[in-house]
Image (cartoon, rainbow, N blue to C red):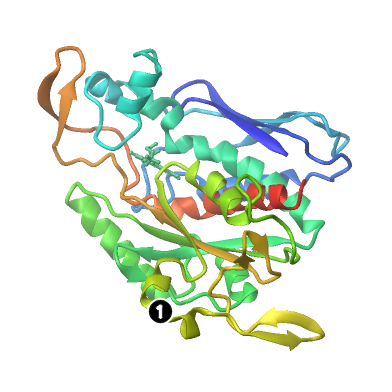
């Protein structure tokens, strides 16, 4: 399966074309919509005030409720745009957003309104594609789930099993420990009240992939495949598998995952490797953490340059923004992981 996302934040619509979806899948559109609702903006004071219904419409690739194997096109109309908020920063790029890099690449022709194609809004079609991938994976006994693992240094409980992660999917603030979730919310609101933003991390796990998939080499390496999908999610600035950066503080005796036999199957007692050894799945859940940067668009004054004159200047951003991207990124990370898992399975 391959996908291509199209659209701009303030254009008429955004969408995705997914190629190579196996024919004969009874596509549950309500499940696609449910995933989109998890990511939707305008759900409380900790997200952007932009209101979007994010209703998905299938244009092709499904006939009489089943996928045909032809390209599957899904579209989501934009409705709540405030394009005038962006006129003032058309030639004065927002620090750390895609504005400057996009301006150079497109030779000044990019749709600057609301971040154009670089907007976090473009993760809605990714979630739709991921929702299709999740339905394909379910046929292979594979399930993907995620939770907020930290926001601005406040950490959620550690992930123990698949059941606890399944319970998180229904929550509007997807954490394992709701008390920690409340602390995280306060940290977001504090930053917001000061015209600032905060970042954090999403922990994700893929259950049910058999051992032996992938290869050590570039292109087929399982960690490499996942990383490629995950770094395509805007605001993801780090991805680490299993114990990840904590490996640097461990000895081999602590880091190694001892083997044992459980129900006649070779498994490991711990899963510090995150389900991958030598670029190949080892049959344990694939676990990773994606680090999400603080939202680049903040209300505080910031230094920029007027690209017309080359003069240094100060800007203030008036658009509506998420004071923290992490809560809304949870279904997005799951979607990217589901698409990566399909590739690992050779679908
Ligand atoms: C779900 C989601 C929502 C986002 N919302 C915003 C936002 O409101 N304001 C903003 O400046 N960036 C937002 N972003 C992040 C930017 O799109 C991203 O930082 C920018 O494109 C630059 O890409 P980079 O951070 O990967 O380098 C969002 C990202 C995601 C995944």
Query: Where does the image place residue 110, in percent across and percent down from the top left?
Result: 40, 17
The one of 21 and 38 positioned closer to us in this rendering: 21
Say if residue 82 shows up in the picture: no
Does the closest atom of ligand 1 sit within 8 Å of the Cβ of label 1? no
Query: What residue is at 32 percent from the left and 69 percent from the top?
Result: 154
Asked which quadrant contains residue 312, the reply is top left
Query: Where does the image place residue 190, in percent across and percent down from the top left?
Result: 22, 58
Q: Is residue 275 left or right of residue 26?
A: left
Q: Is residue 189 left or right of residue 66?
A: left
Disc 1: which residue? 250
Query: What residue is at 47 percent from the left and 80 percent from the top?
Result: 252
Query: Where does the image place residue 292, in percent across and percent down from the top left?
Result: 39, 52
Quadrant housing the N terminus: top right
Compared with 261, 234 (above or below) is: above
The one of 322 and 210 positioned closer to us in this rendering: 210
Q: Judging from the image, what secondary structure is the residue with disc 1 in?
A: loop
Asked which quadrant contains residue 286, the reply is bottom right
Say if residue 161 shows up in the picture: yes
Query: What residue is at 16 percent from the left and 24 percent from the top?
Result: 305
Bin the neighbour count of mark 1 within 10 Å (Cα to Cα): few under 14, some 14-19, many 20 and up: few
Asked which quadrant contains residue 13, the reply is top right
Compared with 1, 164 (above or below) is: below
Label count reads 1
Q: Is residue 175 left or right of residue 205?
A: left
Query: Where does the image place residue 265, in percent across and percent down from the top left?
Result: 78, 81
> Ligand 1: which quarter?
top left
Query: What residue is at 25 percent from the left and 27 percent from the top?
Result: 93
């Amino acid at each position: 399966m391959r996908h291509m996302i199209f659209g701009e934040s303030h254009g008429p619509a955004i969408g995705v074309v997914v190629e190579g979806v196996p024919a004969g899948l009874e596509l549950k559109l309500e499940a696609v919509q449910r995933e989109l609702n998890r990511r939707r903006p305008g759900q409380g004071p900790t997200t952007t005030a932009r209101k979007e219904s994010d209703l998905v419409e299938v244009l092709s690739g499904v006939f009489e409720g089943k996928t045909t194997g032809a390209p599957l096109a899904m579209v989501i109309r934009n409705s709540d745009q405030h394009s005038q908020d962006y006129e003032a920063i058309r030639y004065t790029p927002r620090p750390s957003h895609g504005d400057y890099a996009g301006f150079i690449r497109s030779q000044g022709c990019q749709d600057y309104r609301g971040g154009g194609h670089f907007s976090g809004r473009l993760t809605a079609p990714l979630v739709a594609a991921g929702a299709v991938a999740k339905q394909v994976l379910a046929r292979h006994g594979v399930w993907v789930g995620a939770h907020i693992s930290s926001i601005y240094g406040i950490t959620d409980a550690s992930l123990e099993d698949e059941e606890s992660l399944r319970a998180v999917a229904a929550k509007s603030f997807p954490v394992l420990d709701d008390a920690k979730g409340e602390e995280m919310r306060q940290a977001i609101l504090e930053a917001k009240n000061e015209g600032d933003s905060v970042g954090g991390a999403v922990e994700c796990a893929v259950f049910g992939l058999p051992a032996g998939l992938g290869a050590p080499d570039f292109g087929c390496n399982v960690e490499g495949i996942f990383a490629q999908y995950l770094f395509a999610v805007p605001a993801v600035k780090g991805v680490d598998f299993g114990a990840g950066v904590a490996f640097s503080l461990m000895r081999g005796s602590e880091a190694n995952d001892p083997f044992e036999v459980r129900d006649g199957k070779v498994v490991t007692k711990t899963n510090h490797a995150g389900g991958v050894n030598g670029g190949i799945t080892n049959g344990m859940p694939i676990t990773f953490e994606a680090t999400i940067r603080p939202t680049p668009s903040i209300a505080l004054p910031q230094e920029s340059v007027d690209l017309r004159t080359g003069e240094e200047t100060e800007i203030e951003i008036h658009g509506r923004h998420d004071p923290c991207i992490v809560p809304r990124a949870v279904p997005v990370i799951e979607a990217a992981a589901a698409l990566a898992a399909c590739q690992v399975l050779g679908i």
